Amino acid sequence: MTFQAVYTSEEKIKEIRNQFPILKEKINGKPLIYFDNAATTQKPQTVIDAIVNYYSHQNANIHRGVHTLSQKATDAYEYARKKVATFINAPKSEQIIFTRGTTESINLVAFSYARAFLNEGDEIIISALEHHSNIVPWQMVCEEKNLQLKVIPINDKGELLMDAYESLLSNKTKIVAVNHISNALGTINPIKTIISKAHAFGAVVLIDGAQSVSHLKIDVQTLNCDFFAFSGHKMFASTGVGVLYGKEELLNKMPPFMGGGDMIKTVTFEKTEYNELPHKFEAGTPHIEAGITIANAIEYIESVGFEFIMEHEQHLLQYATQKISEIERIKIIGTAAHKASVLSFIVQEIHPYDIGVLLDKMGIAVRTGHHCTQPIMDRFCIPGTVRASFAFYNTLEEIDIFIESLKKAIAMLK
Ligand code: PMP
Protein backbone atom coordinates (compact mmCIF):
# COMPACT_ATOMS: atom_id res chain seq x y z
CA MET A 1 0.00 0.00 0.00
CA THR A 2 1.35 3.44 -0.86
CA PHE A 3 1.51 6.20 1.77
CA GLN A 4 -1.24 8.02 -0.09
CA ALA A 5 -3.46 4.93 -0.01
CA VAL A 6 -2.88 4.43 3.73
CA TYR A 7 -3.63 8.10 4.41
CA THR A 8 -6.77 8.05 2.31
CA SER A 9 -8.06 4.87 3.90
CA GLU A 10 -7.35 6.20 7.43
CA GLU A 11 -9.38 9.29 6.68
CA LYS A 12 -12.12 7.20 5.19
CA ILE A 13 -12.27 4.85 8.19
CA LYS A 14 -12.47 7.83 10.53
CA GLU A 15 -15.38 9.16 8.52
CA ILE A 16 -17.03 5.74 8.48
CA ARG A 17 -16.63 5.30 12.26
CA ASN A 18 -18.31 8.64 12.83
CA GLN A 19 -21.41 7.20 11.22
CA PHE A 20 -21.68 4.42 13.86
CA PRO A 21 -22.64 6.02 17.19
CA ILE A 22 -22.13 2.83 19.18
CA LEU A 23 -18.44 2.78 18.31
CA LYS A 24 -18.01 5.74 20.68
CA GLU A 25 -19.32 3.70 23.64
CA LYS A 26 -17.15 2.85 26.59
CA ILE A 27 -17.34 -0.70 27.90
CA ASN A 28 -16.03 -1.27 31.40
CA GLY A 29 -14.40 2.14 31.21
CA LYS A 30 -12.54 1.32 27.98
CA PRO A 31 -13.34 2.38 24.42
CA LEU A 32 -15.41 -0.34 22.78
CA ILE A 33 -13.57 -2.56 20.33
CA TYR A 34 -16.26 -4.46 18.51
CA PHE A 35 -14.94 -7.66 16.97
CA ASP A 36 -18.20 -9.63 16.95
CA ASN A 37 -19.37 -8.66 13.49
CA ALA A 38 -20.05 -12.22 12.36
CA ALA A 39 -22.73 -12.44 15.05
CA THR A 40 -24.28 -9.09 14.21
CA THR A 41 -23.06 -5.82 12.76
CA GLN A 42 -23.44 -2.36 14.25
CA LYS A 43 -25.84 0.14 12.65
CA PRO A 44 -24.93 3.36 10.88
CA GLN A 45 -26.78 6.57 11.72
CA THR A 46 -28.80 6.32 8.50
CA VAL A 47 -30.31 3.01 9.65
CA ILE A 48 -31.02 4.35 13.14
CA ASP A 49 -32.61 7.46 11.59
CA ALA A 50 -34.75 5.31 9.31
CA ILE A 51 -36.24 3.51 12.33
CA VAL A 52 -37.02 6.81 14.09
CA ASN A 53 -38.37 8.29 10.86
CA TYR A 54 -40.60 5.27 10.33
CA TYR A 55 -42.27 5.58 13.73
CA SER A 56 -42.37 9.39 13.54
CA HIS A 57 -43.78 9.73 10.03
CA GLN A 58 -44.74 6.45 8.36
CA ASN A 59 -46.05 3.87 10.82
CA ALA A 60 -49.07 2.00 9.44
CA ASN A 61 -49.75 -1.53 8.31
CA ILE A 62 -48.67 -2.16 4.73
CA HIS A 63 -50.32 -3.49 1.56
CA ARG A 64 -53.94 -3.25 2.63
CA GLY A 65 -54.54 0.41 3.38
CA VAL A 66 -55.94 3.13 1.16
CA HIS A 67 -54.90 5.85 3.58
CA THR A 68 -51.78 7.93 3.08
CA LEU A 69 -49.70 6.54 5.92
CA SER A 70 -50.29 2.98 4.81
CA GLN A 71 -49.23 3.90 1.32
CA LYS A 72 -46.11 5.66 2.61
CA ALA A 73 -45.15 2.61 4.66
CA THR A 74 -45.90 0.28 1.74
CA ASP A 75 -43.84 2.39 -0.64
CA ALA A 76 -40.87 2.42 1.71
CA TYR A 77 -41.10 -1.34 2.27
CA GLU A 78 -41.43 -2.11 -1.43
CA TYR A 79 -38.59 0.30 -2.23
CA ALA A 80 -36.40 -1.80 0.07
CA ARG A 81 -37.38 -4.93 -1.84
CA LYS A 82 -36.32 -3.28 -5.11
CA LYS A 83 -33.05 -2.18 -3.52
CA VAL A 84 -32.31 -5.74 -2.43
CA ALA A 85 -33.08 -7.04 -5.93
CA THR A 86 -30.66 -4.59 -7.54
CA PHE A 87 -28.06 -5.17 -4.81
CA ILE A 88 -27.82 -8.91 -5.50
CA ASN A 89 -28.76 -8.58 -9.18
CA ALA A 90 -32.02 -10.54 -8.98
CA PRO A 91 -33.94 -10.35 -12.26
CA LYS A 92 -37.16 -9.19 -10.53
CA SER A 93 -38.02 -7.73 -7.14
CA GLU A 94 -40.85 -10.31 -6.85
CA GLN A 95 -38.10 -12.87 -6.34
CA ILE A 96 -37.10 -11.19 -3.08
CA ILE A 97 -39.05 -12.72 -0.19
CA PHE A 98 -38.75 -10.91 3.11
CA THR A 99 -38.39 -13.30 6.05
CA ARG A 100 -37.23 -12.88 9.63
CA GLY A 101 -33.66 -13.85 8.77
CA THR A 102 -31.41 -16.47 7.21
CA THR A 103 -32.81 -19.13 9.52
CA GLU A 104 -36.37 -18.55 8.38
CA SER A 105 -35.29 -18.34 4.73
CA ILE A 106 -33.67 -21.77 4.93
CA ASN A 107 -36.66 -23.21 6.80
CA LEU A 108 -38.91 -21.83 4.08
CA VAL A 109 -37.05 -23.79 1.41
CA ALA A 110 -36.87 -26.92 3.55
CA PHE A 111 -40.55 -26.90 4.48
CA SER A 112 -41.92 -25.68 1.19
CA TYR A 113 -39.63 -26.98 -1.55
CA ALA A 114 -38.15 -30.11 0.05
CA ARG A 115 -41.36 -31.20 1.73
CA ALA A 116 -43.35 -30.84 -1.49
CA PHE A 117 -40.94 -32.12 -4.11
CA LEU A 118 -38.54 -34.62 -2.51
CA ASN A 119 -39.41 -38.27 -2.08
CA GLU A 120 -38.17 -41.18 0.00
CA GLY A 121 -34.55 -42.01 -0.84
CA ASP A 122 -33.77 -38.59 -2.30
CA GLU A 123 -30.63 -36.95 -1.00
CA ILE A 124 -29.73 -33.51 0.34
CA ILE A 125 -26.09 -32.47 0.53
CA ILE A 126 -24.83 -29.95 3.06
CA SER A 127 -21.27 -29.33 4.23
CA ALA A 128 -19.31 -29.86 7.41
CA LEU A 129 -18.97 -26.07 7.66
CA GLU A 130 -22.65 -25.28 8.14
CA HIS A 131 -24.29 -23.19 10.82
CA HIS A 132 -26.97 -25.10 12.74
CA SER A 133 -29.53 -23.10 10.71
CA ASN A 134 -28.37 -24.91 7.60
CA ILE A 135 -28.29 -28.33 9.24
CA VAL A 136 -31.32 -28.71 11.48
CA PRO A 137 -34.11 -27.74 9.00
CA TRP A 138 -32.75 -30.34 6.56
CA GLN A 139 -32.53 -32.98 9.29
CA MET A 140 -36.14 -32.25 10.23
CA VAL A 141 -37.40 -32.64 6.67
CA CYS A 142 -35.19 -35.71 6.12
CA GLU A 143 -36.75 -37.37 9.14
CA GLU A 144 -40.25 -36.48 8.04
CA LYS A 145 -39.83 -37.66 4.46
CA ASN A 146 -37.22 -40.39 4.81
CA LEU A 147 -34.56 -38.52 2.89
CA GLN A 148 -30.80 -38.93 3.21
CA LEU A 149 -28.56 -36.13 4.43
CA LYS A 150 -24.98 -36.23 3.11
CA VAL A 151 -22.17 -34.03 4.34
CA ILE A 152 -19.18 -32.69 2.38
CA PRO A 153 -16.15 -33.20 4.64
CA ILE A 154 -13.39 -30.64 5.28
CA ASN A 155 -9.60 -30.78 5.62
CA ASP A 156 -7.58 -29.55 8.60
CA LYS A 157 -7.51 -26.02 7.21
CA GLY A 158 -11.31 -25.89 7.17
CA GLU A 159 -11.65 -26.17 3.38
CA LEU A 160 -14.29 -28.28 1.69
CA LEU A 161 -12.98 -31.46 0.06
CA MET A 162 -14.25 -30.93 -3.44
CA ASP A 163 -13.37 -34.45 -4.64
CA ALA A 164 -15.51 -35.83 -1.84
CA TYR A 165 -18.31 -33.46 -2.86
CA GLU A 166 -18.19 -34.79 -6.40
CA SER A 167 -18.37 -38.34 -5.20
CA LEU A 168 -21.43 -37.53 -3.08
CA LEU A 169 -23.33 -36.12 -6.06
CA SER A 170 -25.63 -38.47 -7.94
CA ASN A 171 -29.00 -38.52 -9.61
CA LYS A 172 -30.47 -38.96 -6.13
CA THR A 173 -29.16 -35.51 -5.10
CA LYS A 174 -32.06 -33.07 -5.13
CA ILE A 175 -30.78 -30.20 -2.98
CA VAL A 176 -27.32 -28.89 -2.17
CA ALA A 177 -27.27 -26.33 0.66
CA VAL A 178 -23.96 -24.74 1.62
CA ASN A 179 -22.77 -21.51 3.08
CA HIS A 180 -20.81 -18.97 1.09
CA ILE A 181 -18.59 -18.06 4.05
CA SER A 182 -18.24 -20.08 7.23
CA ASN A 183 -19.15 -18.00 10.28
CA ALA A 184 -16.93 -20.11 12.55
CA LEU A 185 -13.76 -20.34 10.44
CA GLY A 186 -14.09 -17.66 7.76
CA THR A 187 -13.58 -20.08 4.87
CA ILE A 188 -14.87 -18.69 1.58
CA ASN A 189 -16.34 -21.65 -0.25
CA PRO A 190 -16.07 -22.16 -4.03
CA ILE A 191 -19.81 -21.80 -4.47
CA LYS A 192 -19.78 -21.20 -8.21
CA THR A 193 -18.19 -24.62 -8.76
CA ILE A 194 -20.46 -26.20 -6.14
CA ILE A 195 -23.51 -24.80 -7.93
CA SER A 196 -22.52 -25.86 -11.43
CA LYS A 197 -21.59 -29.38 -10.31
CA ALA A 198 -24.95 -29.76 -8.53
CA HIS A 199 -26.82 -28.51 -11.59
CA ALA A 200 -25.12 -31.18 -13.72
CA PHE A 201 -27.12 -33.69 -11.64
CA GLY A 202 -30.33 -31.64 -11.73
CA ALA A 203 -30.14 -30.62 -8.06
CA VAL A 204 -31.15 -27.17 -6.85
CA VAL A 205 -28.71 -25.17 -4.76
CA LEU A 206 -29.36 -22.97 -1.74
CA ILE A 207 -26.56 -20.64 -0.70
CA ASP A 208 -26.52 -19.46 2.90
CA GLY A 209 -25.14 -15.98 2.35
CA ALA A 210 -25.48 -14.79 5.97
CA GLN A 211 -21.75 -14.13 6.21
CA SER A 212 -21.04 -13.03 2.66
CA VAL A 213 -23.59 -10.42 1.72
CA SER A 214 -21.87 -7.58 3.58
CA HIS A 215 -18.33 -8.60 2.63
CA LEU A 216 -18.49 -9.62 -1.04
CA LYS A 217 -20.43 -8.37 -4.03
CA ILE A 218 -23.18 -10.88 -4.71
CA ASP A 219 -24.61 -11.51 -8.16
CA VAL A 220 -27.21 -14.27 -7.99
CA GLN A 221 -27.46 -14.48 -11.78
CA THR A 222 -23.73 -14.96 -12.31
CA LEU A 223 -23.66 -17.49 -9.48
CA ASN A 224 -26.75 -19.13 -10.95
CA CYS A 225 -27.84 -20.27 -7.48
CA ASP A 226 -31.45 -21.36 -7.09
CA PHE A 227 -31.89 -19.84 -3.63
CA PHE A 228 -29.82 -17.31 -1.70
CA ALA A 229 -30.54 -16.54 1.97
CA PHE A 230 -29.29 -13.77 4.24
CA SER A 231 -30.10 -11.66 7.32
CA GLY A 232 -30.53 -7.89 7.59
CA HIS A 233 -28.78 -7.61 10.94
CA LYS A 234 -25.50 -8.95 9.58
CA MET A 235 -25.45 -6.27 6.89
CA PHE A 236 -25.90 -3.17 9.07
CA ALA A 237 -29.74 -3.22 8.95
CA SER A 238 -32.11 -4.09 11.82
CA THR A 239 -32.68 -7.47 13.36
CA GLY A 240 -35.89 -9.31 12.54
CA VAL A 241 -35.68 -9.13 8.76
CA GLY A 242 -34.00 -11.36 6.23
CA VAL A 243 -34.20 -12.30 2.60
CA LEU A 244 -34.80 -15.35 0.53
CA TYR A 245 -34.01 -14.91 -3.15
CA GLY A 246 -35.27 -17.69 -5.40
CA LYS A 247 -35.52 -18.45 -9.09
CA GLU A 248 -38.96 -17.43 -10.26
CA GLU A 249 -40.05 -20.77 -11.68
CA LEU A 250 -39.13 -22.51 -8.41
CA LEU A 251 -40.85 -19.96 -6.18
CA ASN A 252 -43.93 -20.10 -8.38
CA LYS A 253 -44.29 -23.85 -8.10
CA MET A 254 -43.53 -24.00 -4.36
CA PRO A 255 -46.47 -24.17 -1.94
CA PRO A 256 -46.73 -21.45 0.74
CA PHE A 257 -44.69 -21.95 3.88
CA MET A 258 -47.14 -20.27 6.28
CA GLY A 259 -50.79 -19.35 5.96
CA GLY A 260 -52.43 -16.12 7.01
CA GLY A 261 -53.10 -12.56 5.93
CA ASP A 262 -51.35 -11.06 2.89
CA MET A 263 -50.45 -14.42 1.31
CA ILE A 264 -53.95 -14.95 -0.11
CA LYS A 265 -55.97 -13.72 -3.08
CA THR A 266 -59.33 -15.03 -1.92
CA VAL A 267 -60.44 -17.09 1.06
CA THR A 268 -63.60 -19.14 1.43
CA PHE A 269 -64.16 -22.02 3.81
CA GLU A 270 -64.06 -24.34 0.82
CA LYS A 271 -60.87 -23.09 -0.82
CA THR A 272 -58.17 -20.46 -0.57
CA GLU A 273 -56.43 -19.02 -3.58
CA TYR A 274 -52.88 -17.92 -2.87
CA ASN A 275 -51.37 -14.55 -3.70
CA GLU A 276 -48.69 -13.87 -6.32
CA LEU A 277 -44.98 -13.64 -5.55
CA PRO A 278 -43.57 -12.38 -3.28
CA HIS A 279 -46.66 -12.14 -1.05
CA LYS A 280 -47.41 -15.87 -1.29
CA PHE A 281 -44.52 -16.40 1.14
CA GLU A 282 -45.13 -13.41 3.40
CA ALA A 283 -47.98 -14.32 5.72
CA GLY A 284 -48.94 -11.81 8.38
CA THR A 285 -47.70 -8.34 9.26
CA PRO A 286 -43.97 -8.27 8.66
CA HIS A 287 -41.28 -6.41 10.58
CA ILE A 288 -41.94 -3.32 8.50
CA GLU A 289 -39.37 -0.85 9.76
CA ALA A 290 -36.67 -3.51 9.75
CA GLY A 291 -37.43 -4.24 6.10
CA ILE A 292 -37.21 -0.54 5.33
CA THR A 293 -33.77 -0.29 6.98
CA ILE A 294 -32.35 -2.81 4.50
CA ALA A 295 -32.58 -0.07 1.85
CA ASN A 296 -30.62 2.35 4.05
CA ALA A 297 -28.06 -0.32 4.86
CA ILE A 298 -27.56 -1.14 1.18
CA GLU A 299 -27.19 2.53 0.30
CA TYR A 300 -24.64 2.82 3.07
CA ILE A 301 -22.66 -0.26 1.96
CA GLU A 302 -22.66 1.05 -1.59
CA SER A 303 -21.41 4.44 -0.46
CA VAL A 304 -18.47 2.72 1.26
CA GLY A 305 -17.93 0.48 -1.77
CA PHE A 306 -17.07 -3.21 -1.99
CA GLU A 307 -13.63 -2.52 -3.36
CA PHE A 308 -12.72 -0.69 -0.15
CA ILE A 309 -14.56 -3.18 2.07
CA MET A 310 -12.80 -6.19 0.61
CA GLU A 311 -9.33 -4.62 0.59
CA HIS A 312 -9.58 -3.18 4.10
CA GLU A 313 -11.05 -6.31 5.66
CA GLN A 314 -8.37 -8.50 4.05
CA HIS A 315 -5.75 -6.13 5.39
CA LEU A 316 -7.24 -6.42 8.90
CA LEU A 317 -7.37 -10.21 8.63
CA GLN A 318 -3.78 -10.55 7.45
CA TYR A 319 -2.48 -8.13 10.06
CA ALA A 320 -4.37 -9.82 12.90
CA THR A 321 -3.37 -13.30 11.69
CA GLN A 322 0.29 -12.35 11.62
CA LYS A 323 0.21 -10.66 15.03
CA ILE A 324 -1.70 -13.44 16.74
CA SER A 325 0.58 -16.09 15.28
CA GLU A 326 3.45 -14.52 17.20
CA ILE A 327 1.76 -15.30 20.54
CA GLU A 328 2.77 -18.57 22.16
CA ARG A 329 0.13 -21.24 22.84
CA ILE A 330 -2.26 -19.84 20.23
CA LYS A 331 -3.64 -22.05 17.53
CA ILE A 332 -5.68 -20.57 14.72
CA ILE A 333 -8.65 -22.75 13.78
CA GLY A 334 -9.48 -22.23 10.12
CA THR A 335 -6.53 -21.50 7.88
CA ALA A 336 -8.17 -21.81 4.46
CA ALA A 337 -6.44 -20.23 1.48
CA HIS A 338 -9.53 -18.11 0.83
CA LYS A 339 -10.79 -16.52 4.01
CA ALA A 340 -13.05 -13.67 5.03
CA SER A 341 -12.29 -11.45 8.03
CA VAL A 342 -12.92 -14.07 10.72
CA LEU A 343 -10.15 -15.12 13.07
CA SER A 344 -11.01 -18.13 15.23
CA PHE A 345 -8.43 -19.43 17.67
CA ILE A 346 -7.82 -21.38 20.82
CA VAL A 347 -5.26 -20.83 23.54
CA GLN A 348 -3.78 -24.08 24.81
CA GLU A 349 -5.07 -25.10 28.22
CA ILE A 350 -7.34 -22.05 28.55
CA HIS A 351 -11.08 -22.21 27.98
CA PRO A 352 -12.29 -19.77 25.26
CA TYR A 353 -14.94 -18.46 27.66
CA ASP A 354 -12.30 -17.26 30.15
CA ILE A 355 -10.49 -15.34 27.41
CA GLY A 356 -13.80 -13.78 26.30
CA VAL A 357 -14.66 -12.61 29.82
CA LEU A 358 -11.25 -11.00 30.37
CA LEU A 359 -11.27 -9.31 26.96
CA ASP A 360 -14.70 -7.91 27.74
CA LYS A 361 -13.29 -6.34 30.90
CA MET A 362 -10.81 -4.60 28.60
CA GLY A 363 -13.62 -3.30 26.36
CA ILE A 364 -13.19 -5.90 23.61
CA ALA A 365 -16.21 -7.79 22.27
CA VAL A 366 -15.33 -11.18 20.81
CA ARG A 367 -17.48 -14.28 20.63
CA THR A 368 -16.56 -17.51 22.37
CA GLY A 369 -18.07 -20.94 22.07
CA HIS A 370 -19.22 -23.17 19.26
CA HIS A 371 -20.73 -20.35 17.13
CA CYS A 372 -23.77 -22.56 16.31
CA THR A 373 -21.43 -24.91 14.48
CA GLN A 374 -20.98 -27.79 16.91
CA PRO A 375 -19.99 -30.27 14.16
CA ILE A 376 -17.01 -28.05 13.25
CA MET A 377 -15.88 -27.98 16.86
CA ASP A 378 -16.21 -31.78 17.00
CA ARG A 379 -14.15 -32.05 13.78
CA PHE A 380 -11.31 -30.14 15.47
CA CYS A 381 -11.87 -31.90 18.84
CA ILE A 382 -12.31 -28.61 20.71
CA PRO A 383 -15.16 -27.25 22.86
CA GLY A 384 -15.16 -23.92 21.05
CA THR A 385 -12.99 -21.07 19.88
CA VAL A 386 -12.48 -17.40 20.54
CA ARG A 387 -13.62 -15.61 17.41
CA ALA A 388 -12.67 -12.10 16.38
CA SER A 389 -14.59 -11.03 13.29
CA PHE A 390 -13.91 -7.72 11.61
CA ALA A 391 -15.98 -5.24 9.63
CA PHE A 392 -14.88 -2.29 7.51
CA TYR A 393 -15.16 0.08 10.50
CA ASN A 394 -12.47 -1.78 12.43
CA THR A 395 -8.90 -0.54 12.49
CA LEU A 396 -5.33 -1.79 12.75
CA GLU A 397 -4.99 0.16 16.02
CA GLU A 398 -7.89 -1.83 17.45
CA ILE A 399 -6.10 -5.01 16.47
CA ASP A 400 -2.94 -3.82 18.25
CA ILE A 401 -4.94 -3.20 21.44
CA PHE A 402 -6.68 -6.56 21.04
CA ILE A 403 -3.34 -8.37 20.71
CA GLU A 404 -1.86 -6.65 23.77
CA SER A 405 -5.04 -7.32 25.76
CA LEU A 406 -5.02 -10.95 24.68
CA LYS A 407 -1.43 -11.32 25.87
CA LYS A 408 -2.43 -9.82 29.23
CA ALA A 409 -5.44 -12.14 29.49
CA ILE A 410 -3.30 -15.19 28.77
CA ALA A 411 -0.74 -14.10 31.38
CA MET A 412 -3.52 -13.67 33.95
CA LEU A 413 -4.96 -17.10 33.22
CA LYS A 414 -1.67 -19.00 33.25
N1 PMP B 1 -25.86 -19.04 8.62
C1 PMP B 1 -24.71 -18.48 8.97
C2 PMP B 1 -23.48 -18.80 8.19
C3 PMP B 1 -24.66 -17.60 10.04
O1 PMP B 1 -23.51 -17.03 10.40
C4 PMP B 1 -25.84 -17.32 10.75
C5 PMP B 1 -25.84 -16.40 11.96
N2 PMP B 1 -24.76 -16.55 12.80
C6 PMP B 1 -27.03 -17.92 10.33
C7 PMP B 1 -27.00 -18.78 9.26
C8 PMP B 1 -28.34 -17.63 11.02
O2 PMP B 1 -28.66 -16.30 10.87
P1 PMP B 1 -29.91 -15.67 11.65
O3 PMP B 1 -29.70 -16.01 13.09
O4 PMP B 1 -29.79 -14.21 11.38
O5 PMP B 1 -31.14 -16.28 11.09
Image: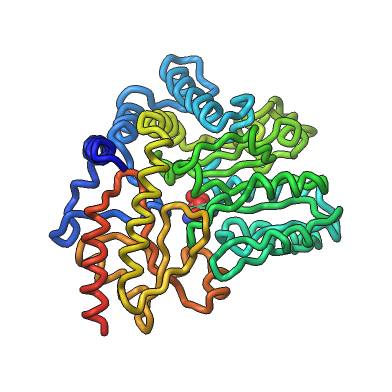
Residue sitting at x 48%, y 77%:
382
- Residues 2 and 123: in front is 2
Judge whether 218 appears above or below 131 on screen. above
Determine the residue positioned at 22% across, 67% down. 405
Total labels drawn: 0
Front in this rendered view, residue 44 or 144 = 44
Q: Above or below — where is 277 with respect to 124?
A: above
Residue 62 visible here: no
Residue 255 placed where, x, y %? 74, 39
Outermost residue on the left side: it is 29
Residue 145, picture quadrant: bottom right
Instruction: Say which quarter of the image contains residue 169.
Output: bottom right
Which residue is pictured at 52% across the width and 54% down the height? 338
Image coloring type: rainbow
| Placement of the C terminus among the 4 image quadrants | bottom left
Q: Residue visible at 66% across and 32% down?
A: 280
In this rendering, the answer to whether 170 lies above or below 262 is: below
Q: Position of residue 327 (x, y in %)?
A: 30, 73
> Is residue 224 rendered to the left or right of residue 39?
right
Q: Is 207 placed left or right of 338 in the picture?
A: right
Residue farthest front in this picture: 2
The x, y position of residue 396, in whole percent, is: 26, 52
Instruction: From the top left corner, tell me how far across and down residue 61 is, in percent.
Output: 47, 27
The N terminus, quarter of image: top left
Residue 170 in sight from this viewpoint:
yes
